[in-house]
Image: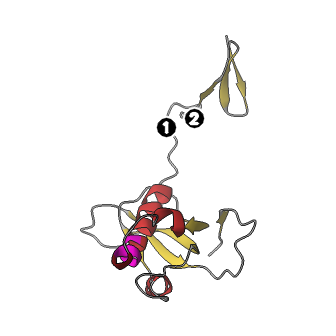
């Protein structure tokens, strides 16, 4: 037997069965929404056991990969300020953590493969204690 609880189907014999369809039958998709969020990335974990002369380039790659995963877009663009912040202490001494703002925007280019792209900038932050991902109003 199943019953509805807070937009999830609950199986009486055990766990949750997640609902991915609305009541009319079409599938929900939030990857087309224009949204901006702030995240904290621990680059120290991403750059563990990476040689000195590859640390800053790998950090930029890690930020791009993180933005692709969070915003579900293949086209990720890095702001110049973020690049300068990553490279600010040289190629070897990358900051341990960075606070970034990822904005998913519509692509105005006519011959683009995707209709959305992600734009990543650095967010102002002095202390990383107790910060959680949050939605930012633009």
Q: Is residue 32 visible?
A: no
Closer-to-camera residue (25/130)? 130
Q: Quadrant of the C terminus?
A: bottom right
**Other residues around mark 1 within 10 Å, as few (<14) / some (14–19) / many (≥20):** few
Q: What secondary structure is found at the residue carrying circle 2?
A: loop
Is 109 on the left or on the right of 12, as rendered?
A: left
- For the point 65% across and 65% down, the residue is 135
Which residue matches tag 1?
27
Image height of 69 relative to 35, above or below: above
- For the point 44% across and 55% down, the residue is 72
Q: Quadrant of the N terminus?
A: top right
Tell me the chief SS of the magenta region.
Answer: helix
Give percent across and percent down for residue 131.
Answer: 71, 66
Closer-to-camera residue (79/19)? 79
Q: Which mark is residue 13?
A: none
- For the point 52% across and 59% down, the residue is 33
Image height of 68 relative to 4, above or below: below
Q: Earlier in the sequence, mark 2 or mark 1?
A: 2
Give percent across and percent down for residue 86.
Answer: 48, 81
Closer-to-camera residue (29/89)? 89
Residue 57, by quadrant, is bottom left
- Residue range in magenta is 54-58
Q: Is residue 49 visible?
A: yes
Q: Are marks 2 and 1 in contact (CB under 8 Å)?
A: yes
Which residue matches tag 2?
22
């Amino acid at each position: 037997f199943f019953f509805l609880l807070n937009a999830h189907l609950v199986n009486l014999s055990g766990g949750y069965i997640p609902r991915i369809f609305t009541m009319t039958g079409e599938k929900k998709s939030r990857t087309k929404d224009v949204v901006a969020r702030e995240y904290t990335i621990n680059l120290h974990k991403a750059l563990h056991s990476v040689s000195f002369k590859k640390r800053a380039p790998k950090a930029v790659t890690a930020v791009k990969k993180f933005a692709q995963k969070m915003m579900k877009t293949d086209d990720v663009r890095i702001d110049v300020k973020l690049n300068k912040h990553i490279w600010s202490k040289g190629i070897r001494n990358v900051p341990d953590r960075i606070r970034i703002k990822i904005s998913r925007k519509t692509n105005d280019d006519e011959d683009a493969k995707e209709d959305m792209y992600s734009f990543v900038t650095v967010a102002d932050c002095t202390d990383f204690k107790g910060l959680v991902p949050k939605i930012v109003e633009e």
